[in-house]
Image: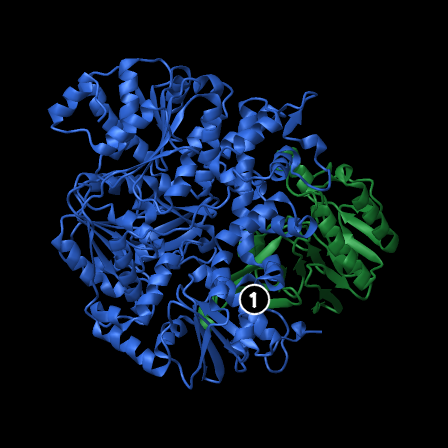
Chain colours: A green, B blue
Amino acid sequence: MTAAPIHFRNERLMLDPSGAAFWPAKRVLIVADLHFEKSTAFAAQGALLPPYDTRAALERLTRLVRLYRPAKLIALGDSFHDGKGPARLAKDDRARIEAMAREAQIIWVAGNHDAAPHDLPGQCVAEHREGPFVFRHQAEPRLGLRDIEISGHFHPKASIESRAKRISRPCFVSDGASRLILPAFGSFTGGLDVRDPAIAKLFPRGLRVFLLGQEQLYSFALEQLGRLAEVA
Amino acid sequence: MARLPEIFERWFDAKNWRLRTHQAEMLHAAEAGEDALLVAPTGAGKTLAGFLPSLIALAAQPSGKLHTLYVSPLKALGTDIARNLQTPVAEMGLPITIETRSGDTPSNRRARQKEIPPNILLTTPESLLLLLSQENSADYFSALACVVVDEIHALAGTKRGDQLALCVSRLRALSQTRVVGLSATVAHPEAMRRFVGPKTRLVLAEDGAPPEVKMALPETEIPWSGHMGLKAAQMVLAQVEQAGMSIVFVNTRAQAELLFAEIWKHNEKNLPIAIHHGSLDIAQRRKVEAAMAEGRLRAVIATSSLDLGIDWGGVDQVLQIGAPKGVSRLLQRLGRANHRLDEPSRAILVPANRFEVLECEAAMQGVREKALDGDPPCPGGLDVLAQHVLGMACAGRFLPEDLYREVISAAPYADLPRQDFDDVLRFVEDGGYALAAYERYRKLFRDAEGYIYPANAKVTQQFRMNIGTIVEAPMIKIRLLGRRGGFGMGLGEIEEYFVNQLVPGDSFIFSGRLLKFIRLRESFIEVVEAPGKEPKVPAYAGARMPLTTNLASRVRAILHDPACWGAFPTEVQEWLALQKRRSRLPGPEGLLVETFPRNGRWFMVVYAFEGRNAHQTLGLLLTKRMERAGFAPIGFVATDYVLATWSAYRPEKIDQLFQEDMLGDDLEEWMETSSLLRRSFRQVAVIAGLIPRQLPGAEKNRRQVTVNSDLIYDVLRKHQPDHILIRATRADAAHGLIDLSRIAALLARAKGRITHMVLSRVSPLAVPVLLEIGREHVAGEAEDALLAETEALIAEATAENEIRHNFSHGPKGQNMLFQRS
């Protein structure tokens, strides 16, 4: 897997094709919208989805922690599908999280699905500031003057017309100046197209997307999505 | 000869009818209490033959209970039959009540039917399961004497057929009922007989007049490729003009839209010509059907949406545009014309390309010889069984042993191992996951005696909203806005997949109108009528059926024998003769493979004739082997007739490429990642009740309440590859989308008998498939390659331009931020 660098002012972040971001200068690993225990939330509603989603996401996350050796892990909110999620964690999965917390300090940013603090190791915060960055769950329409915001919430995805078919993938979204939105990292998380006004209006001066691939990211400007026919 | 009761005899006499042999034989079967399968052509009085025993019994012994249940694949058919049955009942003054029941039946009538059942109830498999899942079902069906299954050939071997067979096994457990199957065409009478019951009497009616089928070609040259048949539009219009009313059958909804548009371009006389397909709004379809029934139309362009259905009587001819695909399907379509027994149905086949000329000839041969096709029914689906098990629990508590015995009495499940049944039961209970996570969310409970019953009322309620085995791709409604704005008029539905490809301002063809996409709302799109450049046509996934084995072997035989070419137009004859000179003609035995260089690539064309699905799978497996052999394959394309691959190096040792072990590890590896299996999984998951069905009204917050089935599939496959739903998915795919049995048959046929022609240039027969290149299907695993290609293409095209976003750029306009590290 090849991560792609993106620069904000003097800081460099690495965007990983798994959907996580890494800040090498401070050794911070960032993921968004883990939605742990989504399957059990659905099961309570009568849809008995495979209960392997938390485990699958944790396995992917563990691989990243092994790869980047972060000092800090920031989860950008909606880490659990609902407030009772932490209580439903299987013993093994809880142990995995605890093991991870011994490797890196975990910052649990509150999301709309999991607003209340919980008892898992690490710190539960409303938002987190470090260096020029503000880490929050959902992008604020207006940013502080010198803030660079890193957020999740929208589960952005984008689709592009290729020679044979249209391909849709989760993606990072950024204006390259003051905002970065991460794709959802959870196993059962769908997506919202970046052309949807809810996302697009956050980027009045245009945006660039980075589609997740198996080995690398694929980058396009907003105006190129769905417009290949005119280019080719 | 069976004697009719006097009142019936008088009624027959008054109509100047006599009891036909097959009708009498059906009466005998009823008297003997036997199950029966009646195979009779349209117009032979099949329906009356099916119902006569019940009418006689009910006339002799009036009853307040349900006596006869009629099940057909179409609601409309039930309604039509009910109307037809009213005639004898009214004219003879019989004390018999007849009613229909379907999803459309108003709730007050349904409630009344529950209290006071009619003597004869006409319904569909889905509504039957709903009835059987009611708590009072044992009493409701206790006096049932006869189940009539109409158009049984359209049900047996499908998931709806599996569902119906299970329901019938329950009906047999609740009552002493006998079962009667009615069918026009049956390819496998033995299998169909077993489907009805173990000791079924087969009743064959006399044949009607044989159909008159001919081929018609457009006056312009016959296209090398393409399947739409648009060049034939004017000729089709001329044929329509000469007849009273025509049905113009096509193969896909997209073809229906395009041909409809093309025909109207030339329809200067404004002949009333309509369009009918499964995505159109139901009200619009009903309007078209009503206009047909009243004889107000001259032609309808239709897909399989009109294959079955009520008798319109007034249809004078049927046209089939494009490949017929199979003899049974063609016969079914021919049967739509002329419902009188003693007059032939008239049909015209219009091939869309050269290969289809051969296929039409083969199909006409097949029709003459009445050589029906179709595979014998395969074992019943485990997903359907899961739905049934839950339904039976809703009806009342049961012991697993009892239900298992009942289930294996249904033909599709006769060989079901007990272990599979138990796995299905566990899936319904708690998901059946190795990780015992759902103890407290169980849907079924077992009591101390081992009885099983639903955990709560919500389980029953959810079951009732998810009945059925027809799973549509996610659809979005289309609303046509008028000039004065307002709410707009419903036009029908298109697949969400297609909507996702639209950008506001794009135009597309639907319902015969040229529409401009305005915007996507929560659960529908808004459009206006407007002219546009290069409109798109909605495509529907999985709509194309492959060429049948029967027809394929006929095509091979015709190809090989120049004596059969006499009826072909000169250009087709010349084409085949040229192929014979330049290469070989593929024959009924063995396998012809050609290799030749072209534009710096090596092409390999495999004349397999096993249908598109099988070729698609074969292409994936073959290119994998070519990769290992070092030929550096670049791509492949599959049609119904041939498979073509192209590679950087010249393929050699062709025999080794086609060894039968291809279906071993390579297949396993490919199935692991294939996107085809994801598509099958979605259907299986919906039918089995894992993913809730999209319901009207519930669409609004659909995005919040469902999880993408692809994600579920990926997680489940990885963590529990032997889960019952993964097994059901693989079984489905093996029979359908990847068509393994046909590949196996091909490899066996080819073994030691491959003719490899090394040519210096493309052969005449290979031209059509080469023209398909560029339109090929690209499998899911190649997506990353496409993304890389697209990214590079855009970078190249925009390299000299200023890119309009505030990212920093390097000196050559390249984006410095995103170089690979």
Q: Indicate whether B700 appears above or below B809.
A: above
Chain letter belonging to callout 1: B
Above or below for B792 versus A88: below
Q: 10 Å neighbourhood of mark 1: few (<14), some, or many (≥20)?
A: few
Residue A206 visible to an observer of this rendering: no
Residue at point 44% right, 39% down?
A: B160
Furthest toward the front, the residue is B1
Q: Is residue B200 above or below residue B300?
A: above
Image quarter of residue A113: top right
Between residues B224 and B144, which one lies in front from this camera angle? B144
Percent x, y of residue B619? 51, 67
Residue situated in front as seen by the camera: B775 or B134: B134
* Residue type marked 1: Ala
**Which of B590/B716 is in front?**
B590
- Which residue is disc 1 drawn over? B782
| Image quadrant where one finds the N terminus of chain A | bottom right
Q: Among all residues in the image, which is located at the extreme bottom? A: B760
Image quadrant where residue B447 sits: top right
Q: Residue B205: name its quadrant.
A: top left
Q: Image point 22% across, 43% down: which residue? A: B207
**Percent x, y of residue B714:** 63, 52
Q: Position of residue B635 (x, y in %)?
A: 51, 72
Q: Is residue B486 left or right of residue B731?
A: left
Which residue corresponds to the image point at 25% horizontal and 58% vertical from the top-left?
Answer: B364
Residue B139 seen: yes
Q: Is residue A102 left or right of residue B450?
A: right
> Secondary structure beneath disc 1?
helix
